Each structure stands twice: as C-alpha cells, then as structure tokens.
Image (spheres, helix red, strand yellow):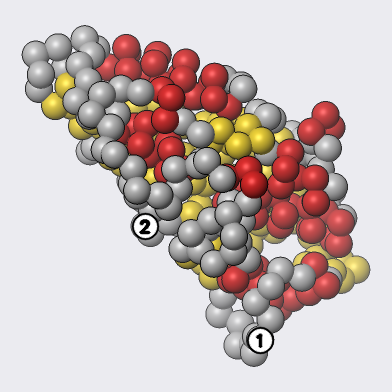
Amino acid sequence: MNDRPDSLVDAPLGRESAYPEHYDAGLLYPIERAVNRAPLGIEERALPFDGEDEWHAFELSWLNARGKPIVAVARFRLPASSPRLIESKSWKLYLNSFNQSRFDATGDVIQLLERDLAEAAGAPVGVEVFGVDDPALTPRALPGESIDEQDIEISDYTPSAEHLTVGEAIVEETLHSHLLKSNCPVTGQPDWGSVMIRYRGPKLDREGLLRYLVGYRQHQDFHEHCVEHIFTDLMARARPERLLVLARYVRRGGLDISPWRATPGERPPSPLRLARQ
C-alpha cells in the first residue's frame, strides 16, 4: 500500500473511528480536486469536460418524530465543477450519524443533506431519497457493445495511453467493459467497476482499448480521477468529436460511486444501476 497522500493525512478513511451516535456534519472530509487534476493538465478554471459524480447510499436511516426507524436509499449528484470531492469513508460516517437522530419529515432530511454536502463540496449537490423497493433502483445493463470477450494476452497493469490507437474510419459507437479495477489510494483495497465509452470520431482499436482499461488494475486513485484520467487520455490520443466516459463502481461500505465526464453537450443515459452495484 502506498503512503497516505498529504491531502489525506487527517482523513478518517482506514482509521478506527467511534460510531457516530447523533447527526454530525463535521464528519464530512472534503478534498480539493485540483491536487489530482494538475498532473493530468486539467485547469480548474477551464475544465475540458462536463460531468457529475453520482452516488448511491444504501444504508441511509433515521428516526421519525415518534422514534420509529425510517430506512431509505439516497442518490446524490455532485457536479464535476465543484472545487472539492468528499472522501467516501467520511461520507459514510456522516450518513451513519443520522441513524439515531429524529426528523419530522423526509423533506427535512433532504434539506439537511443538501445543505451539508453543498458546503463540503463548494457547489450545490442534488439529493433524491427512495424507498427500498422503488422501481427506479432496479438494476439494468450498460448500453453498447462489450469489448471483454477478446482473447488477448496482457502483462501490463499500469495505465498507458500508448495502447490507445485509432483507424481512419469515422464512427459513432458505444462500448463497455466490466474489467475495470483500480485501488483505493489510501487503503489499497480493490475498487471494482464497469466503464462505458460513447464517442464519435476515429474508430478506436478495441484490443488496445481493453489493454488500456485493464492497465488500471494496480493503479491507486479515486474513482472520480480514474474517469478523468481515461477521458483526458482518450481525448489526447483519439481526438474524438464527442466523448462520454461513464464508470459504475461496485458499492463498498454501503456506497457506490458512478462518475461521468463528457465533452460539452454530451449527456449520460438516464440514471441506471448495474447488477453488481
């Protein structure tokens, strides 16, 4: 495991923490995005993409006014333009702090979540709360064609943009892979995911694309920055007219994170969850 980066010295991730008994917004630990964007040549004042970090929280609960537990699932949308992301263990601890806190109505919980998360991120955060049986949470499949069945030999497990090559034909297609894996930058724990790439431009060599994506297998970084890394490499090597990169990471600790980054004007499919999430 790599040493803890300076930006995470005081983060709760991977540390013994007392279980929060009551609501505490101070548990949230924001991290400046610029620290990880600078090595990719991304300037905060002129982002080359639109995007969001979509989170699902499957362990959200609180007490109603009479002390009866309410159990729900929350969806959060954190804009990629926000100056800060929020470290996931701190987010989990923050949500746990609602467990023994009383609220008169679900709307009060939503307002509190919106306020606290916006303050931590430095930008408005969308919040939706669902019942655990809501059909909006039904898993679906990623659009497009899988590139995973290629019978290729791989020995390089670090991301290298040199694998990304294109042909002369201009195409518009959607591809996906379920072989994405990266590692937590602090604990080294595996983060499993799927990635979808939708683009219009010179046709990507699929073997090279798969080698490139598998290259993240030993890479240590946050989900959000892995997606930005993939986006910037594809833009630099393939030069598509339009591009969308969307990752759906498997939940850990009751949270999943699904970032997407796209050229201006491109939008992802309507919110979807995969079976692994």
Residue 25's x, y, as percent? 41, 23
Residue lying at the far right of the rendered structure: 168
- Residue marked by disc 1: 155
Cα gap from disc 2 to disc 1, whole angstroms: 29 Å
- Residue marked by disc 2: 275
Q: Which residue type does callout 2 highlight?
A: Ala
Q: Nearer the viewer, mark 2 or mark 1?
A: 1
Is 13 left or right of 183, judged from the image as shown?
A: left
Q: Is residue 54 above or below residue 244?
A: above
Tell me the quarter of the picture where residue 164 sits. Answer: bottom right
Residue 270's x, y, as percent? 51, 39
Is 243 left or right of 145, judged from the image as shown?
A: right
Disc 1 is placed on an element classified as loop
Local packing at callout 2 (Cα closer than 10 Å; few below 14, some 14-19, many 20+) is few
Q: Residue at x 63, y 43 (%)?
A: 7
Q: Is residue 243 above or below residue 163?
A: above
Tell me the quarter of the picture where residue 63 sits. Answer: top left
Task: Give whichever of 202, 223 is nearer the camera.
Answer: 223
Is 255 left or right of 49, judged from the image as shown?
A: left
Disc tally is 2
First in sequence, mark 2 or 1: give its number: 1
Residue 161's x, y, as percent? 80, 67
